[in-house]
Amino acid sequence: MCGIIGYTGKNKVKPIIIDALTTLEYRGYDSAGMAVYNPDKKRTEVYKCAGRVRDLSKVCEDKNIDSTCGIGHTRWATHGGVCDANAHPHTQGSVTVVHNGIIENYKDLVEEYDLASSLKSETDTEVAAAVLDRCHAETGDPKKAITKAVRKLKGTFALVILFDGEPDVIYSIRNVSPIVATLSEEGAMLASDLTALTRFTNKYFVVPEYTIVRMTRDSVTMWTLDGREVEPEYLTMDWEKNSADKNGYPFYMEKEIMEQPKAIRDTISGRTKAGIPNFEADNIPDSLFTDCERICVVACGTAMHAGLVFQSLVKTRLQMHIDVEMASEFMYSDPVIDDKTLVIAVSQSGETIDTLEALKYARRKGARSLAIINVKGSSIARESDYVMYTNAGPEIAVASTKAYTTQLAVFYLIVYKMAHIRGVMDDDEVRECIRNLKRVPEVIGSVLDGRKAVHVIARGLLEAKDLFMIGRGLDYSILLEGSLKLKEVSYIHSEAYASGELKHGPIALITDNTPVVAVVTQERLMSKELSNIREVKSRGAAIALFIKADLIQQSTREFDTFMLPNLPDELMVFPASVALQLLAYYVSSDKGFDVDKPRNLAKVVTVE
Ligand code: M6R
């Protein structure tokens, strides 16, 4: 979950580290630190503090840091509270380390190496540093020390290491937790994720697991643990150079909401031929979709919510068996998986450990797999048989927005593709669906143009402590996501409920202090939805209604209403979801919160 950066090159390292950590802060933001080699004093110096990267900047403000080699870290606490001592980097003897992941056997290592009295923090990371230092003392060689030390470590780790005796050299090794690296004219650089590299280069490689990396200012060398040299496999990043900047928006979340028309266009583009879904560019054979008898989606959070929309579509359009599983529960629920199951893993980051482990489990059980991923070359993408990338560009705000709607776009393409090749829909029907899908960016554009009206509704929710979101069918699926969005950025307790289920219990909570957000976009469910809305209204709830334009009638005008532009009902999830994202955004920003970095959260969840 933490952000990691390492640079050795021609340039002064301090601004590079501060800049990269600011970009990476979305991975964790409770503490920050950096270590640089001081050539005058011939030793590594560490600057760190609890707090944000801006606090770290202040800590090093008046320090004369001339070094051109250093490592940095922004933390999401796992072991030990949030305090200066627990912030990374950690030094033990000649070794200084930053770490992402969890060393599961750290307690055993403390005993084995009798470390208790020498530790200055409560972290598992410092234990890893101490083991590395012991191994360095025994072997006198960084490579041998790393080889020996990692054989002792259990758990997930991305370690970036400085050894005192080797100025200007950075070492790294990883298991599961990601590291990407690059070598450019400016020097060598590595990071926990791509966003930190975009300003430097569009070429990068993913460090393979259990491979030792040694970076100098003009070289990157890698070896397996048995000493075999490994060549980096360079990939090209198709994100634009400044795509990770805010571009004048106060928050990334707003910027990313506004980017959705383009993101969806880019995701659909190249995936149809003569109006029919075509996945040749993704190298996906039709057999992946014809040979399966059942589908299982594994994902977490927002990505899992995208799966729920897919589930409705698969049932309606294909009448196929489909499960959508929380990846964190999947393995422990004895899921029914076999070689006739198509497992679809969905993830923005491609690094969510629960989703990765669920995918691995399903593959071991014989399932074929497809991953829907935003970050190219990420762990889940590499683990899966096939990948479809959502071309959303970097998503920095912790609250996922454009990743979700682009995941939906891919799911719609898959459903229409499957319906076509399984003979459920003919060419004309599919072409009509694709024509409508291609209208989605424009329709989202008009929701964005009308965002002031959502802002007005948001102002009515600022004082709410608890809130319900209600709808039926597809509306209910997207409300689960709308509700997650609101709670994570506004800290309002929000529950999404299927409207008809409300009176089986939760309606007891409705008072005139419990606003209700209702979404009505499905004509066949409308009259029942409106009855449910009236049930809560008559118990005092203030209603904010998001309704498809064509469904507005005299009787719905009594509510605070946002009119959603028309699309066929099946596609209304797009404008409705965007309106709910805006709602969450405005509530959070009007309350003065740090919208992009909600309390306790991190963007990439690499611990189980
Ligand atoms: O990177 P992923 O899509 O795998 O992340 C999954 C969830 O952690 C993520 O969607 C999370 O729920 C977001 N904070 C929601 O906004």
Image (cartoon, helix red, strand yellow):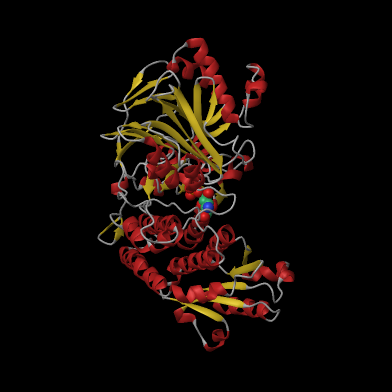
Where is residue 121 drawn, in percent x and y? 62, 31
Side of 99 where 197 appears, left or right: left
Where is residue 60 drawn, in percent x and y? 47, 39
Q: How many marks?
A: 0
Residue 441 visible in the shown view: yes
Where is residue 603 drawn, in percent x and y? 50, 48
Q: Hey, which quadrant is residue 418 in on the image?
A: bottom left
Residue at image position (44%, 23%) is 41
Given residues 157 and 119, the one toward you in this image is 119
Given residues 503 and 146, the one toward you in this image is 146
Q: Hey, which quadrant is residue 469 in on the image?
A: bottom right
Side of 501 where 365 appears, left or right: left
Given residues 259 and 414, the one toward you in this image is 259
Locate the C terminus and report the quarter of the image it occupies: top right
Where is residue 569 drawn, in percent x and y? 45, 71
Residue 322 visible in the shown view: no
Q: Where 198 falls versus 430 (above or below)?
A: above
Q: Where 428 falls versus 30 (above or below)?
A: below
Residue at image position (33%, 34%) is 182
Residue at image position (50%, 41%) is 59
Q: Residue furthest bottom?
A: 554
Given residues 354 and 55, the one toward you in this image is 55
